[in-house]
Amino acid sequence: MNNPTSSEQPFEVAVVGGGIIGLSLVLGLLERNIKVKLYEQTSAFNPIGAGIGLTPNAVRALRLLSPKALEAQQKVTTANGDPKNPNDWLMYLDGYHVEEAEEKLLFQLYSGYRGFEGCVRSDLVNQLVQLIPEEIIHLGKRLKHVEDRGDDEKVLLEFEDGSTAEADAVIGCDGIKSKVRRIMFGVDHPCVEPGYNNQYALRGLIPMSRAVEALGEYKAHNRHMHLGPGSHVVTIPVALGKMVNIVAFIPDHDKWSNGSSKLTAVADKEEVVKAFSHFGAPVRGIIQALVETSPTLNKWAIFDMYENPAPTYAKGRICLSGDAAHASSPHHGAGVGMGIEDNLALCTVLDEGLASVSRGEATHGSAVRAAWTAFDLTRRERTQWLVSSSRVIGEVLEWRYEDSMDDFDKCLQELTWRSHKIWNFDEKAMVQSSIAEYKSQIETRTSQSHRQDSSKEVTNITIVPVVAELTGPETPRKVTVG
């Protein structure tokens, strides 16, 4: 753990965005004794979305990032089936060709012991907030501008309410419509606007009793994917078995009417029921329960950064994490996990950077720039692959991926290798790789700085003209040197 040198001002990080990624990042920084402040644009924490799941890699990364954050997650997570003997298989059913009420099991995928469990998003956010001292959190701070004024000054943050703040480093955790990303690249850069996936989702929570009525006891208490042509439905037990999270995907061949400025719209409940009228009774029943128990049912447009990825996640002393850097569609269920991995890498390289400052090997400014570059080089390839692969999985689960269609053996092959690439990630190796990359970056920057200093010394040498007398067999002459 690190403390700034006494000759420099106290080091502080500004985190923009108070979702799960921003909150877990704050806890990771606090774990390493790094001073931080969180700026959230809303006046109260009101997380978007109903339920989420954490993949096996996400849980391991969260443990390394902040044991306290992991404890918070474990308090609200819901096991599949019996918590004492959890069902660790992800079950993929034919929700379309259904005789009577029984959906055929098409294939299943083992996720490891308690490998993929769900929780209510707001429950997790509330648990994380309780772990953060009140003076760190600043609500009602909608970001207006960020200015990196050079290493001699701190980065300036300006907010819409007219207030300002300063920090040595800024991390944007402000989601798919990231203001920090817009500031980094400028309003005309393609990566500023995410692209529409021509699909929207219906999301909501229904009481476990209603889920049991539609699906039966076993399916209601265990995670299932109900597949069909062009659409599919995911059911996940959450709230410690009291509720079931429903996500139903519907194709949309038109442009999203609001662009990316507003990603939700009120759904027509009759159209929702009609969209799944050709599915079997279990899916129709779960959709009916969602419609009846939701006072207002919203459509959630599926946008991602597949078409226009960010060319870098870092610029100067400003960087991006989670969806702000690499928003993906939700078909892998790995977006939050990738953001937690990002946070682990960020905390690792920043901790290493501050250690090098303490040893006199770097300044705060050079350490942050090297750290953010190391983070970008460590994380960008994997996270942008996820964005692409998540689109593929969406097609696989709806029998429209060209290489698999409704060949379920091929569907399982695609699902298996892609899921394992996410789940079997070596987080500890990533930590070591990010440290090595930081050291390489700071060494390069130090060498460049030394060369520049040497160049300035040579440039600043005053050359005094010298008159030399040359004698010899030839005619003597005077030569002026200088």
Image (cartoon, rainbow, N blue to C red):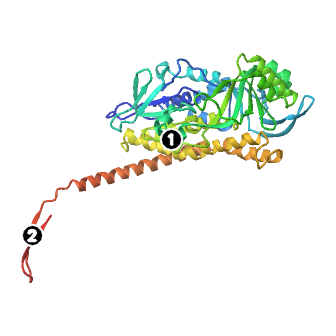
Q: Nearer the viewer, residue 386 or 8?
A: 386
Q: Residue furthest right?
A: 100
Q: What residue would you read off at disc 1? A: 189
Asked whether residue 241 appears in the rendered view, the answer is no
Amino acid carrying label 2: it is Ala
Whole-percent x and y of residue 441? 44, 48
235 to 185, vertically: above or below: above
Q: Residue at x 37, y 49 (%)?
A: 446
Q: What residue would you read off at disc 2? A: 468
Q: Nearer the viewer, residue 187 or 100?
A: 187
Amino acid carrying label 1: it is His
Q: Residue at x 9, y 81 (%)?
A: 472
Q: In this image, 222 relative to 170: left or right?
A: right
Can you say which quadrant of the picture contains the C terminus? bottom left
| Quarter location, residue 99 | top right
Q: In this image, 248 relative to 193: left or right?
A: right
| Quarter location, residue 234 | top right
